Image (tube, rainbow, N blue to C red):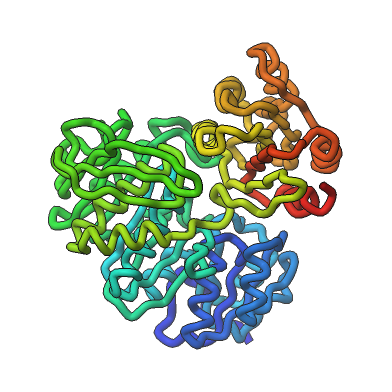
Amino acid sequence: MKKNLSKNLIPDRVKNIHLIAVCGTGMSALACMLKDMGFEVTGSDQKTYPPMSDFLFSKGIKVTEGFNEKNISIDHDLIVVGNAVTKENPEIKKMYELGLNFCSMPQAINRFIANGKKTILVTGTHGKTTTSSIIAWILYEAGLDPSFIIGGILKNFNSNYRLGKGEFIVIEGDEYDTAYFDKGPKFLHYDPYLAAITSVEFDHADIFKDIEHVKQAFNTFISGISQKNTLVAFDRDKNIDSLIRGKKCGIIKYGQDTSSAWKLGKVSYAPPWTFFEVLKQGKTFKAFKTRIFGEHNLLNTLATVAITDKMMIPNEVIAKALESFQGVKRRQEVLGEKKNITIMDDFAHHPTAVKETVRAVKSFYQNKRLIAVFEPRTNTSMRNIFQNIYTLSFDHADIICIRKPPLLNKIPPNEHFSSEKLVDDLRNRGKDAHYFPDTESIIKYLEKTAKPGDLVLIMSNGGFDNIHHDLLKRL
């Protein structure tokens, strides 16, 4: 028996929920939160891989490999549709055939998770996961019992979500599109009490035409922040400067400009610690200690100090939280060491993120030879948009390994990124760079090349064929 015609809405009574493309970081967090709230939850995805697949399994959520109309039944009260899902997906077709209710991930978060709470939203091209994670941990250490949904697994919680009883929820605000039926950015769905914007650069070439298109999305977001609420904005980004001009919401600037309310002061390293000073209105606010390293991460941390101070959290509590913050998986995460060779994993994929990550790791581990391994895998990095810019991203690496993009069949041939050309360009700049057609050839090369005292930095936004663990086994 068919229900009424499918509608993009959430019914009053919901018990059984199915999530299509459940293994994305945001979708998996939502699935687990719904499960913890007592809903019956199932999911499906085209490719399931750790850590999200393991995380969902540990929660008792049944995840089906591959999309199939058999995964959808008349018993589902609601279908949550991931943004990577198209209208041609067999589960979507079955959803329409049965007349089931459906919604996007942000719609579900607003209805089931964020309803009645004050939202702290972190946006920007880079640094969203780290910044929102630190805020969540400071709020927790302050006894505010926060909820959060973040695009990475926080080591302090071993989770990318939390259901708290406090009045605040921390959300990582993604500029990527919402769903096939809603092509606007996800962050437009939220009404932030406090928001941060870390950077605005061109990215997501599959949905944005150019930087002006990206700026339009952020402009709509900032324009929608209410006059009584506040945006914390990075001070050394020309795009941000133009976007915040004349806006009605409160603006607090942070970074390195003397005119900004919050400024990064003296920084020193004594591994595993980073010591840094924070200035508020030109005067010393406090000296902090953290395991986070790299200028870009310290600036992200500065944003968290500005936000949590605005929330009247004492600087002693902030300091204690920063010292005990353990980081986020896949963000400069040391996965292991064999034969005194360190293997580090990082999510970096945009050329700016790659550059800052390589620079940060080299500055922190100055005595180690740095071998940078990069897989261009995103819809943007597999395009030739940043072909020449990537050449400047590896200056601080001693050896560079570039893999052939693994999913080039998704990209029009005339837009293909060339790893071979990148390697040639790097060599022309005097760099020790090498091209590899697949992951296995990289592992074989590293088996022969890596020496005691080296650090292998592996950068990809995907699973990279489990290269990290295979390499540790083979060394």
Q: Quadrant of residue 281?
A: top left
> Which percent across, then down, holds residue 135?
35, 59
> Which percent across, then down, holds residue 474?
84, 49
* Viewer can see residue 469: yes
* Viewer can see residue 205: no
At x 58%, y 47%, the residue is 347
Marks counted in the figure total 0
Query: In the displayed structure, does residue 223 sit left or right of residue 451?
Result: left
Q: Nearer the viewer, residue 373 or 339?
A: 339
Query: In the displayed structure, does residue 5 sit left or right of residue 456?
Result: left
As drawn, 75 above or below 258: below
> Which percent across, then down, holds residue 79?
55, 73
As drawn, 287 above or below 172: above
At x 48%, y 38%, the residue is 208
Q: Nearer the viewer, residue 88 or 5?
A: 88
As drawn, 126 above or below 26: above
* Image quadrant occupied by the N terminus: bottom right
At x 54%, y 69%, the residue is 158
> Which percent across, then down, holds residue 398?
66, 26
Residue farthest toward the front in the current orientation of the protein: 270
At x 43%, y 60%, the residue is 325
Q: Quadrant of residue 42?
A: bottom right
Query: In the displayed structure, does residue 4 sit left or right of residue 51?
Result: left
Q: Nearer the viewer, residue 389 or 274?
A: 274
